[in-house]
Image (cartoon, rainbow, N blue to C red):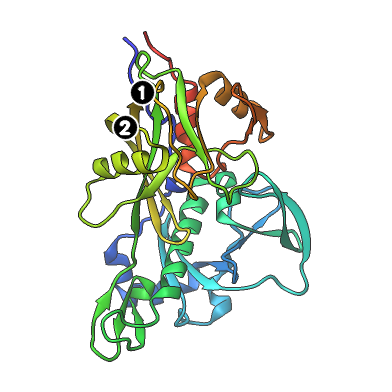
Amino acid sequence: MTAPFQLGRLPTLSRSTVDRQETLRTNPERLRTRWVTAEVLLLDRKLRTPVREGESSLATRKAVTFGDLPPKDALFLGEWEGVDYWSLPGEPDGEPELVPVRGSWGVREEIPKAGDELWVDLRAYGDQLDDRSAGLFTTAQALRNWHRQARYCARCGGRTERLQFGWATRCQSCGREEYPRTDPAIICLVHDDVDVNGEHVLLARQPVWPPGRYSVLAGFVEAGESLENCVTREIREEAGAEVWDVRYLGSQPWPFPRSIMLGFAARADASRPLTPADGEIEDARWVPRADVRAAFESHGEAVALTGGGTMILPGTSSIARVMLEAWAYADPGA
């Protein structure tokens, strides 16, 4: 008997090998002693990091080049195979040239190149990194984004100081401690109620997206709301569809700036009219499995949709793409 589809692989930014347990970052003596053999991941002002052309590993730097001890703004990322990894702000050397690459939306953009190093964006390049590098880059960006917003105390407005080598802050006025924030958001692949895995998937596009970009629906979890209730509410609000059989698929950190995407699947009646949210959803439609497969096989190029128009799939680093891939190539069932 055909089973409901599941994710066929880990989402790109969920891959990680690094040990980041609390006991490591709360042991200053250990971290300072191991600094001489540690590696540093640099992030520029746009949160890009260097990789060497044609390689899948980050181009990290030797920690000792930044001093005998961790600088005050160094963020500890974790340990892997006997090596500690940190993050620091940094920029390309000299006057880098700008080179064209395919960006996170499948469109061309320019990024800095210094020597044999490309300074890449996590959203666009994450899928090309190995598991260790993807996990380090994701963690570094999440922490850096949080610290940009955590300079002042949420209680009294006082200046904060960093604790645990970047994993906490403490207000210098009232002593309040705070830890990195993550905002939960659901993302749901809704298919029709035909057989086990359906024949059509509900896709939508926002007006600010590049032409032809479609994806599954998503939204933030509200205060006092369960994940399942959030799925039901968001799909109703954004597309006017009522869903059932809500089930969990998997998750992915999404540090843009501080979310975690919680993936679900659900069913809906494709015969009922859709009502896209005014000003938020430009178009919502039921797309047949054959069209989604054609989009995967187009290698990033737009494909014609059965109902008219064209479609480009979500970016390669998104959980939405992994969800759509799993559904598109699943056995429809009978």
Which residue is identified by label 2?
242
- Neighbours of disc 2 within 10 Å: few (<14), some (14-19), many (20+): some
Residue pointed to by mark 1: 269
Name the element at disc 1: loop
> Which amino acid does the dot numbered 2 rest on?
Glu
What's the residue at 76%, 63% (across, down)? 115
Give the x, y percent position of residue 150.
Answer: 38, 76
Q: Residue 37 carries which label?
A: none
Nearest to the observer: residue 72 or residue 282: 282
Question: Tag 1: residue type?
Answer: Asp
- Residue 289 placement (x, y as % from top left): 51, 20
Residue depicted at x 69% and y 46%: 107
**Which x, y percent locates residue 67?**
53, 82
| Quadrant for the C terminus in the image | top left
Q: In this view, does 70 lie above or below 105?
A: below
Query: For the point 41% across and 54% down, which residue is it?
Result: 18
The residue nearer to you, when weighing 55 against 38, is 55
Of residues 74 and 79, which is closer to you in this image?
74
280 vs 189, nearest the viewer: 280
Q: In this view, does 68 lie above or below 18?
A: below
Q: In this view, does 223 lie above or below 61?
A: above
Circles 1 and 2: CB atoms closer than 8 Å:
yes
